[in-house]
Image (tube, rainbow, N blue to C red):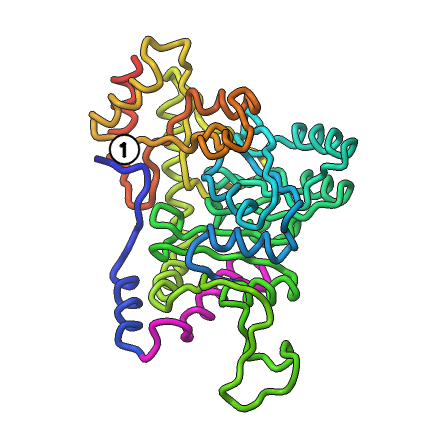
């Protein structure tokens, strides 16, 4: 089976983790700061706060921006559920903005129309969370311009997009957002096994994120209510969580970051091959924006269902049976049972549902070779023609 994604671990990665196991620190040691610095170097962000998951990073990003009871957060319906759950963790209400049918990212025109309607009923969002699906950035400048007009903050869910670029600048630079969040799950561009990170240019937000990551506790006297009682002293100055990343994860991440450019280049190479080899099949390949350079976490095809004699499910099953580990990213969040219990219904976001009805993620990762690409393409030919 060729999986749709997998980790790419080499001997240097293994040695980095082994070194930590032989060191005095398994958590809260020097590797964490070194890993965070490598993310700052790659993204041009001033501050990076690594966490034990991207879900945790999204949660504390919302809290750092003041999201709470009675607030409203908007995100894309085509994402992993964590993009929406993070708002609910804070007691906020969640809503969605339909996707652009070409890029599969948040539609700027749908966002603008929804903002106009929300203003009329005093229901504007406090935060909007655009999702860079598959590693291609949303149109962040356009979203940022709307944020100035309608007074909302922006969290980029860049879980798929470390190593990507927007308008020739790295995703995570936060030129058009307050905070960006990355994921380091094993199928992502780099991995820390499980892990995530929030990046920002704002020192005050970084301070909040750091406190929220670790129980709201500080040993920094400048943040305390009075002078230290002694060298042992710490204070809990806010309610936080144990969202810390271990030294083992950080060491693996630090090692992986040395190959970030290579990982992204290989994924783009295979994507270009797919573009050419799939061009005559009854499917649509991903559309690139001239403003973006995708990290290609995913290569998502759209089946031309009316041109083939098989159902979406049949195509999926036959490819799996042929050893091609296709997947589907994602089931629209608003049709999940939990969200239907909140009042969302099928039909609410038609572009997202149309996307879901014909999408497949085909294998794409840095551990593949040219022969794997041809095997995937040949299997698609056999199944679709």
Residue at which label 1 appears: 325
Q: Residue at x 49, y 87 (%)?
A: 232
Residue stretch rendered in magenta on the structure: 24-48
| Nearer to us in this view, 83 or 241 | 241
Q: Which quadrant is home to the C terminus? A: top left
- Which residue is nearer to you in this view: 325 or 285? 325
Q: Is residue 255 above or below residue 262?
A: below
Residue under the point 21% across and 30% down:
323
Residue 134 locus on image (x, y percent): 46, 38
Q: Nearer the viewer, residue 1 or 282?
A: 1
Rendered image quadrant of residue 18: bottom left
In the image: residue 340, left or right of residue 24: right
Q: Is residue 34 magenta?
A: yes
* Residue 381 x/y as whole percent: 29, 19
Residue 319 percent coordinates (x, y): 26, 24
Q: Position of residue 189 (x, y in %)?
A: 40, 48
Is 282 placed above or below 128 here? above
Q: Nearer the viewer, residue 86 or 322?
A: 86
Q: Is residue 165 shown to the viewer in this render?
A: no
Q: Is residue 137 magenta?
A: no
Residue 28 relative to residue 19: left or right? right
Res 304 seen here: yes
Left or right relative to 209: residue 30: left
Give me the residue at 40% from left, 19% from top: 303
Residue at 24% in and 27% down: 320
Mark 1 crowdedness (10 Å alpha carbons): few <14, some 14-19, many ≥20: some
Tell me which corner region of the image, top left, top right, bottom left or bottom right, holds residue 146: top right
Vertical order, 312 against 297 (above or below): above
């Amino acid at each position: 089976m060729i999986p749709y994604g997998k980790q790419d671990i080499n001997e240097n990665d293994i040695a980095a983790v082994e070194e930590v196991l032989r060191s005095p620190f398994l958590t809260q040691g020097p590797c964490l700061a070194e890993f965070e610095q490598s993310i700052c170097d790659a993204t041009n962000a001033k501050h990076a706060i690594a966490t034990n998951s991207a879900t945790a990073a999204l949660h504390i990003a919302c809290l750092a921006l003041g999201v709470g009871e009675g607030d409203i957060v908007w995100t894309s319906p085509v994402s992993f559920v964590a993009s929406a759950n993070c708002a609910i963790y804070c007691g906020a209400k969640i809503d969605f903005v339909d996707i652009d049918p070409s890029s599969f990212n948040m539609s700027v025109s749908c966002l603008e129309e929804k903002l106009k309607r929300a203003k009329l009923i005093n229901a504007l969002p406090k935060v909007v969370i655009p999702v860079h699906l598959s590693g291609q950035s949303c149109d962040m400048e356009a979203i940022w311009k709307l944020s100035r007009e309608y007074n909302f903050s922006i969290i980029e869910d860049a879980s798929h997009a470390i190593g990507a670029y927007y308008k020739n600048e790295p995703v995570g630079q936060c030129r058009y957002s307050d905070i960006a969040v990355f994921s380091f799950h094993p199928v992502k561009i780099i991995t820390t096994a499980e892990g995530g990170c929030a990046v920002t240019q704002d020192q005050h937000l970084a301070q909040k994120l750091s406190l929220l990551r670790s129980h709201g506790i500080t040993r920094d006297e400048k943040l305390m209510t009075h002078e230290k009682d002694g060298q042992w002293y710490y204070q809990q100055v806010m309610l936080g969580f144990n969202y810390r990343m271990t030294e083992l994860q950080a060491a693996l991440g630090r090692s992986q970051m040395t190959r970030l450019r290579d990982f992204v280049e290989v994924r783009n190479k295979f994507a270009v091959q797919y573009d050419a080899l799939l061009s005559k099949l009854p499917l649509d390949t991903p559309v690139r924006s001239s403003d973006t350079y995708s990290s290609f976490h995913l290569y998502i095809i759209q089946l031309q269902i009316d041109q083939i004699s098989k159902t979406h499910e049949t195509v999926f099953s036959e490819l799996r049976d042929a050893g091609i580990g296709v997947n589907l990213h994602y089931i629209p969040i608003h049709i999940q049972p939990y969200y239907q219990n909140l009042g969302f219904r099928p039909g609410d976001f038609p572009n997202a549902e149309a996307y879901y009805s014909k999408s497949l993620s085909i294998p794409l990762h840095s551990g593949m070779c040219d022969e794997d690409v041809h095997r995937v393409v040949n299997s698609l030919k056999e199944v679709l023609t």
